[in-house]
Amino acid sequence: MRKFFILGLILIAAGCKSKRMTSASAEKFQLENLAEVIAENDLETIYPEAQISEGTDLFEEGTVERPYSILYPGTADELLITWKDDARTQLHQLRFDKNGRWKALNGIKVGTTYDELVRLNRNPIKFYGFGWDYSGAVDWNGGKLSDSGIRVFLTPTNTPPGKFVGDQIVEATPEEIETLNLKVQAVLYQPE
C-alpha cells in the first residue's frame, strides 16, 4: 500500500511540472517568457515563423549603438530586441508598440488604460509630458510595478494642452487625465 502511495505522489508531482514552452504555446507572446527563451538560446526554436531580421542602429536618444533583432517585422506582432553584445547572446531590452499578441505577464499591452495601470501598480502613477523621445514615459512611483522591469509609454487619445508637452513629469487632475484618455502606446521589458 505504501508503494502505491509513493508512486501516486511521484505521478502527481510529475504532472504538476509546467510543460516546456513550444513554438505553439500562446505564452510565448509574454515578454518575460521571451526573455527566458533568449536566455536559454531557444529563440529560433520557439519562434521559427518570426522571420527575424537583424541590424545595428543608434538607441537611447542616439547615444548608444546596439545590435538588434526584429521578430515578425512589418506585422502587428513586430517586436524589437536590443542586445548588449554583437554576438546577440545578452539581452538588453524588449520593446513593442503595435496592438498584436505581445503583453507582459501582468497583462499590460498596447491599449491598456491609465486606470488599469494604476490598478495593477496598486499606487498612483506619474507620467512625463508628450512630444519628445520618451513621450508619456510612466514613473511607477514606488508601486508594485517599480521593480518589474516593465516600462510603458502613454499616449493621449485627445490632443493634450501645452502644459502636457515636454521633458518633465506633468501634474494632472483626475478630470484632465480623463479628458486625455491615456492608453499605453509602447511596452518595454528590461530584465535586471
Image (cartoon, helix red, strand yellow):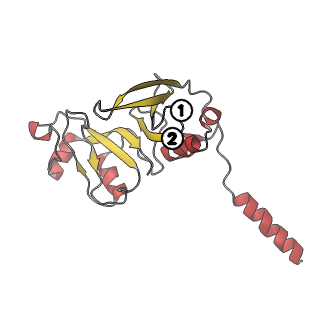
Label drawn at residue 87: 1
Relative horizontal placement of residue 26, taking residue 129 as reference (left or right)? right
Q: Residue most toward the left?
A: 162
Q: What residue type is disc 1 on? A: Ala
Q: Secondary structure at mark 2?
A: loop
Q: Position of residue 51 (x, y in %)?
A: 56, 23
Is 146 above or below relative to 77?
below
Q: Position of residue 185 (x, y in %)?
A: 33, 36
Relative horizontal placement of residue 61, taking residue 100 as reference (left or right)? left
Label drawn at residue 2: none
Q: Position of residue 6 (x, y in %)?
A: 82, 72
Residue position for label 2 = 90
Q: In the image, what residue occupies the spot 41% across and 37% down? A: 95
Relative horizontal placement of residue 92, taking residue 186 as reference (left or right)? right
Q: In the image, what residue occupies the spot 41% across and 46% down? A: 108
Query: Badges 1 and 2: C-beta atoms under 8 Å apart?
Result: yes
Q: Residue most toward the front?
A: 86
Q: Position of residue 167 (x, y in %)?
A: 17, 40
Q: In the image, what residue occupies the spot 56% across and 40% down? A: 38
Q: Secondary structure at mark 1?
A: loop
Q: What residue type is disc 2 on? A: Gln
Residue 118 image-quadrant placement:
bottom left
How many residues crowd around disc 2 within 10 Å: few (fewer than 14), some, or many (20 or more)? some
Gap between marks 1 and 2 measured at Cα: 8 Å
